[in-house]
Amino acid sequence: MLVPQSSPTGVGACIVGSVAAGLFADIASAQDRLAPAARRFDPDPARQAVYQELYGLFRSVYMGFGKGEPLDLGAVLPRLRAFRLAQA
């Protein structure tokens, strides 16, 4: 996963605008120059169970809000807190 080291807000518009204005030949060239540097995060195979637990929680929240699937919002924060405390 690549995470920008600074805020990427508005960068896409600047990239497209700079190409449209002729400052760069193409999107790739503008991205190379204008996009913020990114920090890389690689998954740790030993933590796969942790990732699966968090993904399950994320998916339930996403599907609850996005598709109207049943969701117990009162359980989300306690599960996240318990997860964080278990990782400490």
Image: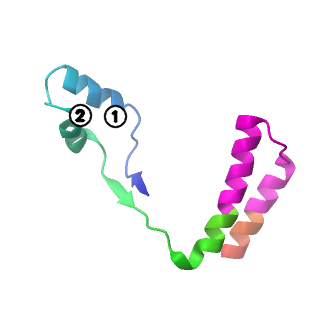
Q: Tell me the quarter of the image containing the N terminus.
A: bottom left
Q: Are marks 1 and 2 in contact (CB under 8 Å)?
A: no
Q: Position of residue 82 (x, y in %)?
A: 77, 67
Task: State the residue position of label 2.
Answer: 27
C-alpha separation, residue under disc 1 versus residue under disc 2:
12 Å
Q: Image height check: is 58 above or below 15?
A: below
Residue at the spot x=72%, y=43% of the render? 63
Q: Which residues are magenta?
A: 54-80
Looking at numbered disc 1 in the image, what kind of residue is underneath it?
A: Val
Corner quadrant of residue 86: bottom right
Task: State the residue position of label 1.
Answer: 11
Nearer the N terminus, badge 1 or badge 2? 1
- Which of 61/69 is in front? 69
Q: What secondary structure is the stretch in magenta mostly built from?
A: helix
- Identify the secondary structure beneath mark 2: helix
Looking at numbered disc 2 in the image, what kind of residue is underneath it?
A: Ile
Inspect the magenta stretch and tell me whether residue 62 lies in it: yes
Q: How is the image coloured?
A: rainbow
Asked if residue 88 can be seen in this view, the reply is no
Q: Residues within 10 Å of mark 1 (few under 14, many from 20)?
A: some
Q: Position of residue 50 (x, y in %)?
A: 65, 70
Inspect the magenta stretch and tell me whether residue 61 lies in it: yes
Residue at the spot x=49%, y=69% of the render? 43
Corner quadrant of residue 69: top right
Q: Image height check: is 13 above or below 81?
A: above
Asked if residue 58 can be seen in this view, the reply is yes
**Residue 85 numbered tag:** none
- Identify the secondary structure beneath mark 1: helix
